Image (cartoon, coloured by chain):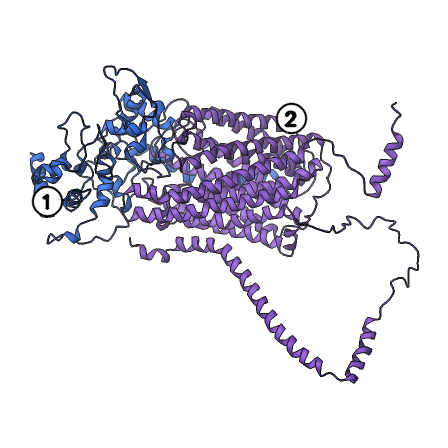
Chain colours: A purple, B blue
Amino acid sequence: METKNLFSESGIIITLILILIPLLFAVIIVIIKAYAAISQYSKRKELEKFNEYLKGISSDELEILEQQKRAFEFSLSNNELAGESIPFDKKGLLDNIREATPLRFIEQKKKGQPRPYIEPALTKLILWYLGCATGWLLLGTTAGEMVGIKFVTPDLDHYSWLSFGRLRPVHTNAVFWGWASLAMLGLAYYVVPRVSNVPVTSIKTGYWSLILINASVIAGSICLMAGINNGGGEYREYIWPVMALMGIGVFISLRNFLKTIAKRTTKEIYVSNWYIISAMMFLLVIAAVAYWPGWQKGLGETIVQGYYMHQGVGMWFMLFNLGLLYYFLPQQLNKPIYSYSLGILAFWAQIVFYTLIGTHHFIFSAIPWWLQTIAIVGSAGMIIPVVAGTTNFLMTFTGSWNKISGSYTLPFYLIGIVFYFTGSLQGTAEAFRFTNLIWHFTDFTVAHSHITMYGIICFMLWGFIYTIVPRLTGKEPNQITVGAHFWMALIGLIFYTFPLMYGATLKGLLWMDGKPFIDSVSLMAPYWLWRAIGGTLMWFSHILFAYNFYYMVKQKEEIVIPSTPTGILKAKQELGNQPVTN
Amino acid sequence: MHFFDDHKKLFRTALALFVGLTIMVAILPAIHNQENNAPLPGYKPLTEAEYLGKKCFIANGCVACHTQQVRNVDMDKVWGSRPGIAADYAANTRTDLWRNTATLMGTERTGPDLTNIGKRQPGIAWHLLHLYQPRAVVEKSIMPAYPWLFEIKKDVGINEMEVIVPPAFRQAINGKIVATKEAIDLVAYLQSLQQTPLPDDKEPKEFLYKKKETPLAANGNQGNLPDGQALYKQNCASCHQDNGEGLKGAFPSLKGSPVVLGNNLELYVNIIMQGYDPRPEFAAMPAVGTNNNLTPEEITAIINHEKTSWGNNAQTVMPQAVKKIMDDIKTTTKQ
């Protein structure tokens, strides 16, 4: 295979386009700026001409201009109808009046919506879910950070429990099952009852679910570090008794949600619940298939592994998050979703195509060629749900783009949606046979999984969490630390993934060239360093996130000096009611 | 629509669609595959030690970086003589009550593929040193070190193996570094990893996406030989090192070596093709040339690289002469 044909391969072209989309936006901005500069220049020329004309202006002309000026400047005094009496806002129509302070280093973002009525017990449950999830995010990415640094300094430590091969699955499983899954379930405890317009059936079940899943991740992480794993399939490293805890946890919450939906007072089932319930049902099917004992001899294991690892990502994390997005996005933009039918199309298309694509992780391996082909076709079919979904979300945004700059949650949504498009289609491009030659087995896969799991899932989850926690607790995070979290996570992700993709391409070409393997290791050294730098930024951003979360939920009594009329009157009343204590 | 407003119908339909597709693309193919494949006739089952070694390989998560699959594409030719087939994996069954089957095919190749490592790198001394500290043998390696598979002892017992570690990697260790049984088992497993030959009448699958062949040395022109330095790096440097100096007490130096500089080409080619073990202080050399299917042109390029590098300055050789010796070796070994 000659390397000069590289740019005529469709997979490569698609990937380049996807990488170039953000650059294209940058170019457009540059063009707009340049155009502005040019028109500024020509205006200045015009002004010079005009000044020449002014010098020679006659007194008649001046007189006419004076008259016109007086006419234009005539204005009403604004009290012709009201008279001189003081204005009085009897119905409280004026609200949220902001006074401009002299210096604003940071733009004032929009405050969260006032707290809707949510049962205090449910609030507590949701906060517990999100709190545990945040804890797992910190632990899981600390493991990830260590693993990433070990690429740069392999002799960092020599403890068996912390060695690369054992710690890597600790990282992936903790962020999958501990962080993302718990956060999703916690948010679902908010969304499912709200869109069904009934209280959730059992709050107690929610706690059982939480305990079981936490137990599963704790036991699983310890087992993995102790060298007890299921046999090496990615994300299937927990042994079955550990995974069974997870399965039971999800199952009882699924029943809880189903009962809630059955009692719903709305006629229709909002599309969020389609996605959420299906994701939970599918996860149970996937886990049962993957962990059923008594089969999976030889390549049977590999075929199931391909199915399992990809359905885990696509049918659990992706489907669940899309469900949450269908609730939170319209709600944040304060308008309905652009097209309900596109959401439904994306739902069925996702099931049909995504289920087929598992084996695209084993292209050119010994599994049947026809099965590999189905996986590639399915991967191409994924264009349908991804384009349908992205269109739907972006069209919902249309007309509200100005809201992004004034909100600290919407940027998370937007980044999630952009990566949903580029990350998912990158997966399609990677599945082609030629791109597999270059990128399979390289660090490109690692970059891709971070673009998707981090760029899509994590950014969306953060957006959702920053949306609802202030409503649950009534306390908003410090918007400077939210902004720092956002930018560090985004820049970190870019430092992490772009160098890895570039280096991995060189690595694949080097392998195709038949160069010694060890050259491909030394080639990657600078890109692995970049990855460690990006990873560190991401890790710091999680500490900020944890701080923000803590800030939003801490129960410390805040000293508020009332400034609103209601507040002042209430305070006065409370002051008067206070019994004399001394 | 009524269908969309009935939660039972809606969710049952979605579940049925997903389960149906699951059966079609995962369950049935997996069952078909496991029912219709058996290990090749020449397959040697793992011994107990090798099996324990495999468990150690699994426990330490080696599969995170090492694949065990030769794909049917030309670039994978370096990892095996033929593409992998389903039968190669058919002997893997469920590990135990707690653990699933481990085919260990892997999805990342941060380290080399191990399908044929038993053939490519059979020396136990090399493996033990490499496990103790990979950078002692491969300078650029980023593989983790596994010192917990070794013990520090005053004396080496009978049936125990000491690992000769270069001083730079022995920080503050005074005793002897001895391999535990786990390490020995792990090496036994690695040594067992070899492609089983196909039965005589079976043609292997073809390697796809072939590289354009450059016509080779028909007239013995040196300029047409493959890159000797790269081939040396690929096949020889893990023991003899990039600088040709080997490792003291483990692998001999090629700098100023009488075999390399001398005129006995037959001995030279013989060592590369069939291995060598004349000196007890050094580890035995495996039959690198035969194991890795090196061609006469490739061997000539390696020999010429060794003869002219690191201060060596001997006369280079022609591929025809090497080819003749190789043909002789083939006929003698066949008889």
Up-down relation of residue A422 to residue A127 (above or below): below
Q: Nearer the viewer, residue A142 or A322?
A: A142
Amino acid identity at mark 1? Lys
Q: Residue B200, can we see it?
A: no
Cα distance in 3D space between marks 2 and 1: 79 Å
Q: Position of residue B320 (x, y in %)?
A: 9, 47
Going by the image, does A479 lie left or right of A528?
right
* Identity of the residue drawn at 79% across and 38% down: A561
**Among the 4 quarters of the image, the one containing residue A268:** top right
* Identity of the residue drawn at 54% across and 48% down: A346
Chain name for mark 2: A
Q: Which residue is mark 2?
A: A204
* Identity of the residue drawn at 51% across and 36% down: A282
Task: State the mark number for residue B323.
Answer: 1
**Among the 4 quarters of the image, the one containing residue B113:** top left
**Among the 4 quarters of the image, the one containing residue A471:** top right
Q: Nearer the viewer, mark 2 or mark 1?
A: 1
Q: Give the mark count.
A: 2
Check disc 1: other Cα within 10 Å, few if <14, some if 14-19, many if 20+: some
Up-down relation of residue B248 to residue B265 (above or below): above
Up-down relation of residue A190 to residue A398 (above or below): above
Q: Which quarter of the figure is the C terminus of chain A placed in?
A: top right
Q: Nearer the viewer, residue A401 or A294?
A: A401
Going by the image, does A23 lie left or right of B222?
right
Q: Nearer the viewer, residue B260 or B45?
A: B260
Q: Secondary structure at mark 2?
A: helix
Check disc 2: other Cα within 10 Å, few if <14, some if 14-19, many if 20+: few
Q: Residue B38, can we see it?
A: yes
Q: Are marks 2 and 1 on the same chain?
A: no
